[in-house]
Amino acid sequence: MNSSESAASARPADLRPETVAVAAGRPPRENGAPVNPPVVLSSTYFGRGPVTAGDRGYARYSNPSWEPFEEALAELEGAAEPGLVYSSGLGAAASALSLVPAGGVVVMPDHSYGGTVALAEDMAEHGAFTLRLVNIADTDAVLAQLRGDGAAGSASMLWVESPTNPMLEVADFRAVTDAAHEVGALVVADNTFSTPLVQQPLNLGADVVLHSVTKYLAGHSDVVLGALVTSDPDLRATLLTHRSKHGSIAGPFEVWLALRGLRTLALRIERSQASAAVLANRLLEQQQVSAVRYPGLSNDPGHARAKAQMDGFGSIVAIEMAGGAAAADALVERLQLWMPATSLGGVESLIERRRRHTNEPASVPESLIRMSVGIEHVEDLWADLVQALEAL
Ligand SMILES: *Cc1c(COP(=O)(O)O)cnc(C)c1O
């Protein structure tokens, strides 16, 4: 790992992830050196003579401001290569999808992040590949799509999102990644919902991990940023070339903010996960709520898988309202602390009825509300929900 190798190797070995999030990506421990990496605002670098592979060249190819975050994220995901930051999660997704050979087949969860499905549909319409959407929790269906039962050819890429957004379905991660590799497909896993503290897809067989850094990693709803992580040096080189040529690069200040956010990731996740579990259990008891989706609930269909492959259950809860879409809208309208907004993963609790987006799949119930639990006191979050539920 490039510039801070000496600093990284000077750290004690086998640090726990909570510590890595704080200690990784620091400048060398030399007197007078800053303890935080500087923001390098320069579009070019001094360069003379023949250009070699290691030259920084120009700031679309490399920026020292990207590297501390790329090293820290890779270490947290257990990757052997530094990560790659992108201008957004979808910028990273476009780069990952570019790994599909022309005319290939991509198998993707039907309840992937909506923007990812829209991007893949757009690329498929332009002839890049054939897209097959599938319920990622239905392992038999995933296997059939990977093999191409019914003549259409086997898959070149499996996209995994688990738990899904906003249905919180849980894939049998190992089973689907093994099956993908059997047909020669690459596996890309969107780990935005879980973060590496809760789930490590590379250890579950994924080849590439994707993050919308916008969400938990940056954590304050003030940055748009994406990242890819892989242990395969050839894949990383291909992705780096794609990023440089297609130009989906991150601003140095955004990456600095994301690293600042990453320092507190463990504390934020600890708090928001604990609160999500409390709220999910209490919401189950409410007569106005007809269903609660949260993999941490013992009766949730994804509970056993989540328990086996995750170190927690995340901080996203989805509920369905007995009174339908109107009750869901009224609930969101009456809240005074929860913020009615799309997105997730910030310190502040966000809530929205997903079908208010016209492109949300019809298989998502009309009354489904997605809740991104933040780090406020859980009793304040609960009191706000109770006053809004009672007013219905
Ligand atoms: C937000 C999100 C994305 C897209 O990331 P952007 O940073 O908004 O481009 C992809 N996947 C998931 C799961 C997301 O929540």
Image (cartoon, helix red, strand yellow):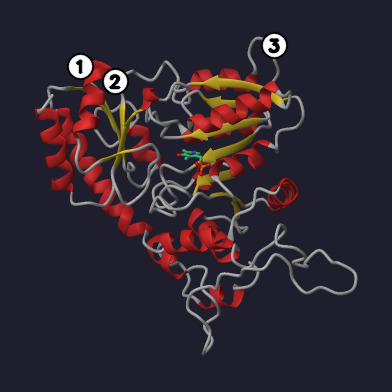
Mark 2: give few (<14), some (14-19) or many (20+) Cα within 10 Å.
many
* Residue under the point 36% across and 49% down: 346
Contact between labelled residues 1 and 2, with CB atoms less than 8 Å apart: yes
Of helix, strand and loop, which one carries label 3?
loop
Say left or right for 106 vs 46: left
* Residue under the point 65% across and 64% down: 63
> Residue 73: x and y, percent?
51, 57
Q: CA distance from mark 2 to mark 1?
A: 8 Å
Lower sequence index among marks 2 and 1 = 1
Q: CA distance from mark 1 to mark 3?
A: 45 Å
Image: 195 above or below 360: below
Q: Residue furthest top?
A: 150
Residue that mark 1 sits on:
323
Q: Quadrant of the C terminus?
A: top left
Of helix, strand and loop, which one carries label 1?
loop
Residue that mark 3 sits on:
151
* Residue under the point 37% across and 24% down: 356
Q: Residue furthest bottom?
A: 31
Lower sequence index among marks 1 and 3 = 3
Callout 2 amino acid = Ser
Residue that mark 2 sits on:
367
> Residue 57: x and y, percent?
77, 65
Residue 326 sits in quarter? top left
Say left or right for 191 vs 270: right
Q: Residue furthest right?
A: 50
Residue 97 sits in quarter? top right
Q: Quadrant of the N terminus?
A: bottom right
Residue 233's label in the rendered image is: none
Contact between labelled residues 3 and 1, with CB atoms less than 8 Å apart: no
Q: CA distance from mark 3 to mark 2?
A: 38 Å
Callout 1 amino acid = Gly
Lower sequence index among marks 3 and 2 = 3
